[in-house]
Amino acid sequence: MIRFTHVTKEYPRIGTALSDISFHVSKGEFVFLTGPSGSGKSTILKLVYLDEMPTRGEVKVSGINARLARRRDIAMLRRKLGVVFQDFRLLEDRTAEANVAFELEVTGAPAAGIASKASRLLSQVGLGSKATSYPKELSGGEQQRVAIARALANDPFVLIADEPTGNLDERATRGVIQLLRDINAAGTAVIMATHDLELIRRSEYRTIEINRGQIVFDSAESVEEREARKSAPGGER
């Protein structure tokens, strides 16, 4: 479903963000990406939704090779992805339901079904009663739930979450994580970047740790695979 093969990403002014990383994410999997700030987590996510292209190596998402993708291919792929950010990115002048409906509108959903689907999605994330509320009238946890409902608008095969609990208190964090668990249990893959090590420790999901642009730990690897990666040229530092 998602495959990185010897991927390096370099920026002209910043330098190397990722160095020769390889991994794959299977259909329906839940994966945590963790590591210190600047380690490369967000770069990986941007490569997944084709906001960035690899400098070297191959990124394939749902059969699309990033380096060979045309604009039309990228646009079509993004309609099958859901993306959630730390800062919610809601439209302040629109209600919760209108925020979700707007996503459906811009991606070409049939107009006749937009209102009912937006309402259903808000109910799915536990906010059916907040449909007419504006973002400023919602708590941080509620705003993130609206953002998740919006990300689910096009029935994505994978939900990409970049520090989705970074601005939330502990209670709201638990609620969002449970919601992501439920979404994953229904068949949608989830890739979540997080600094919350305690959250990861309490979870049974796969964890990939990034440090200085390299994978230093992948809980899905066997001992033999881990040792092979460490001993490879340019391996773990």
Image (spheres, rainbow, N blue to C red):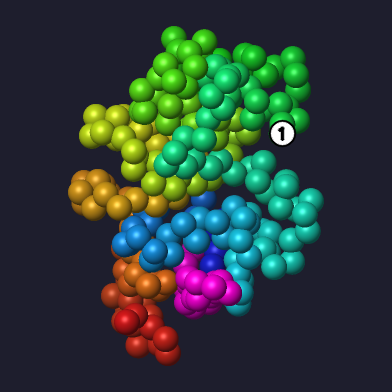
Is residue 125 positioned above or below 69 on the image?
above
Q: Position of residue 220 (x, y in %)?
A: 35, 63
Q: Is residue 7 magenta?
A: yes
Q: Would residue 55 be found to the left or right of residue 198 on screen?
A: right
Picture coordinates of residue 178 (x, y %)? 33, 33
Report which residue position mark 1 lands on. 107
> Where does the image place residue 150, in percent across and percent down from the top left?
55, 30
Q: Position of residue 26 (x, y in %)?
A: 49, 55
User: Looking at the rendering, which quadrant does residue 50 occupy?
Assistant: bottom right
Between 139 and 35, the one lying in front of the other is 139
For the question of whether residue 204 can be seen, the reply is: yes
Near-viewer residue (118 or 87): 87
The answer to which quarter of the image holds residue 157 is top right
Q: Tell me, yes or no, whether the highlighted magenta stretch contains residue 19.
A: yes
Residue at (34% x, 80% y) in the render: 236
- Label 1 amino acid? Thr
| Left or right relative to 139: residue 96 | right
Please state which of residues 91 and 113 is positioned toward the viewer in this rendering.
Answer: 91
The residue located at (60%, 77%) in the rendering is 56
Horizontal arrangement in the rendering, residue 156 relative to residue 199 (left or right): right
Q: Residue at x 75, y 19 (%)?
A: 111
* Category of crowding for the residue at label 1, using alpha-carbon neighbours closer than 10 angstroms: few (below 14), some (14–19), many (at least 20): some
Residue 125 shows up from this direction: no
Q: Which residues are magenta?
A: 5-24
Closer-to-camera residue (29/161):
161
